[in-house]
Image: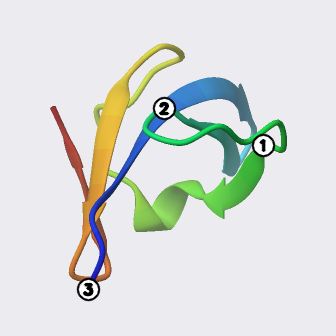
């Protein structure tokens, strides 16, 4: 599986908008906060690997 890197751009209730940081993409991705680590905040950097997110 491919490893991807994101930054939490915005938190909107039970969802977070993620911006890809390792590739040129203009679109934000909406992800349920239940799938993300509890300690996230706007500006948090994440690594997505093996179907899970971790703070880096």
> In front: 51, or 40?
51
Instruction: Look at discs 2 and 1 and give the one toward the viewer.
Output: 2
Q: Nearer the viewer, residue 7 or 31?
A: 7
Q: As rendered, which of 21 and 32 lies closer to the eye?
A: 21
Q: Position of residue 52 (x, y in %)?
A: 28, 71
Q: Residue furthest front?
A: 24
- In this figure, which residue is indicated by the disc labeled 2? 21
Q: Residue at x 34, y 27 (%)?
A: 45
Neighbor class of circle 1 (other Cα within 10 Å; few <14, some 14-19, many 20+) is some
- Residue 25, how many percent across, how many down? 72, 42
Give the side of residue 55 with respect to residue 21, left or right.
Answer: left
Left or right of 4? Residue 3 is: left
Give the spatial CA distance, label 2 vs label 1.
Answer: 11 Å
Whether residue 43 is visible, yes or no, is yes
Of the residues under marks 1 and 3, which one precedes in the sequence? 3
Picture layout, residue 32 above or below residue 56: below
Q: Is residue 38 visible?
A: no
Q: Badges 1 and 3: C-beta atoms under 8 Å apart?
A: no
In the rendered image, which residue does mark 1 sit on?
28
Q: Residue at x 75, y 55 (%)?
A: 30
Where is the N terminus found, in terms of image quarters? Answer: bottom left
Categorize mark 2 by other alpha carbons within 10 Å: few (<14), some (14-19), many (20+).
Answer: some
| Mark 2 element type | loop
How far apart in space, not on screen, are marks 1 and 3 (Cα)?
Answer: 21 Å
Give 41 or 47, whichever is nearer the viewer: 47
The local secondary structure at tag 3 comes to: loop
Q: Earlier in the sequence, mark 3 or mark 2?
A: 3
Q: Give neighbour class at mark 3: few <14, some 14-19, many 20+ (Cα, 10 Å).
A: few
Would you name the residue on which mark 3 appears? 1
Residue 12 horizontal side relative to residue 14, left or right: right
């Amino acid at each position: 599986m491919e490893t991807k890197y994101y930054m939490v751009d915005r938190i909107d209730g039970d969802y977070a908008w993620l911006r890809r940081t390792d590739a040129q993409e203009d679109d934000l991705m909406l992800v349920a906060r239940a799938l993300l680590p509890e300690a996230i905040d706007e500006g948090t950097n994440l690594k997505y690997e093996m179907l899970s997110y971790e703070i880096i």
